Each structure stands twice: as structure tokens, then as C-alpha cells.
Amino acid sequence: MARPPGIDGDVYQAAQALITTRQNVSAKRLDDPGPSGAECDALLDLAAAAPDHGQLTPWRFVTIPAQLRHLLAEVFALALRDRDPDATPEQVQAARDKAHRAPLLLVAVARLGPREPDTPAQERLVSLGAAIQNMLLGAHAMGYGTGLTSGQAMRSPRLHALLDLAVGDHPVCCINIGTVRSHKPAGRVRPAPSAFSSTLVQAAPPPGIPNARSPTLRPCE
């Protein structure tokens, strides 16, 4: 892809390479070593740079240290039994195993309860997503693999209690970070910009609004 005019070539190419080469890596393929304490702090600093309308910091990241993974594992197992009392022992153990994979595991939490200013929930979720992406790109730049995992356990009251979350706080996903044990052959095929973008254009005025023109959309050129 050609560099857009007026943009610093080295900076743009570095950013482009970082963004386009990052892949989601299954937590099963992430091994030690994971980020150090200082590196984890640096990743959280990157999260803090996310867009944040109203400066609400509408997210939390809860690190689950290795010595306490068994607590998260039990929550995953109990949450499965809550949903499916007939779950087999193998299914319950598989649920537990999800807590013991990547060297670094954080739970990303959206803070959607009443706040001032009352920024809409959609904007807060966008902010959380941007914070997560900042962390994923930062970890990729450090040489680590990353993957997001989620599931019905995120909605379990048991997880809410384990993380000591406030009313209005909602676990969204787990962020898994570590050294990639094996790479996928190739990344997913990314859609072309024309497949998901359009440009606003003018059209006939809508009924009941004189001297106004209704917008329509056409593909970007």
C-alpha cells in the first residue's frame, strides 16, 4: 500500500507494519515467557491513551496472577454447571483449563454504570475497544503473541463476585499474552475498504422538510 502524501514515511510504515502483521493467537499456543511486570505496566500505559469522551476511564483491566488462576478456573467450571447441569466432567475440566493457558491473562471490564458526564454506553465500549487494541499492538511490538477470548462465563455473577466489580461493571473478554509456541500458516483475509465504507452524498429532500436534502450513501472512491 502506498504511503499517503504528507505523512512521515518511517512513522507510517512502522505503524502500518505493526497493525497489519498482528494476528490473534489462540491462548493454547501462548507459552512462557510472558511480559514482565514492567512490560505489563507499559501496556496499561498504552491503554490509558485510548479515546475517552468525558475522561471517565470507562474500563478496568484485572490481572489474574498465576498463583490465583485456580480461582478463575473454578469460576469457569461453576459457571458452566450453572448453565448446563448435565455438563460432562470433560467439559467442566475444559472450562477450567481456559484459565491456565497464557502466561499473562487480564480480564477486560466495561464500566457502564451511572457516571458524570453520562457518556453513552456505546461510546464507553468504543473506548474499551481502543484501549484493548492499544495493548494488543503494544504487546505485538514487544514480540509477544496476543489473543482475545470470551464466552458465556463473562456474564456469570460468579465472575462478577470474584473480580469484586461494581454495579454497572461488565466483564467483556480475557486478554491473553505470551510467547507464541507455533504460528498459523497465514492471517485471515482482510476485507477491502470498499466493502465496509461509504461516502455521504446528497439526494432528494425528505418529506415534510422544505429546502432540505436527504443524504444517501455511495461507496468510497
Image: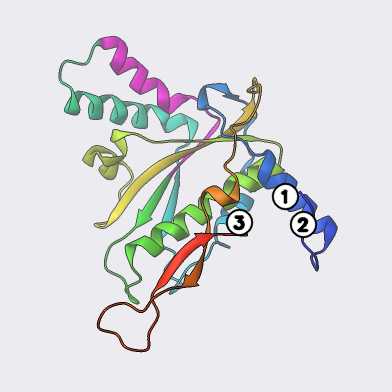
Image location of residue 185, percent across then percent down? 66, 21
Task: Please state which of residues 166 and 8 is positioned toward the viewer in this rendering.
Answer: 8
Do labels 1 and 3 touch, CB within 8 Å?
no
The residue sitting at 50% across, 61% down in the picture is: 218
Give the crowd class for mark 3: few <14, some 14-19, many >=20 residues within 10 Å: many
Placement of 59 over or under 180, stated as above or below: below
Q: Where does the image place residue 44, in percent across and percent down from the top left?
A: 56, 53
Q: Earlier in the sequence, mark 1 or mark 3?
A: 1
Magenta highlight: main SS: helix
Residue at the spot of label 2:
12
Front label number (1 vs 3): 1
Q: Earlier in the sequence, mark 2 or mark 3?
A: 2
Label pair 1/2, CB-CB below 8 angstroms = yes
Residue extending farthest left: 85
Residue that mark 1 sits on: 16
Name the secondary structure under disc 2: helix
Magenta segment boundaries in residue numbering: 89-107
Taking the spot 30% from the left edge, 15% from the top edge, the residue there is 91
Q: In this figure, which residue is indicated by the disc labeled 3?
A: 46
Q: Amino acid at mark 2?
A: Tyr
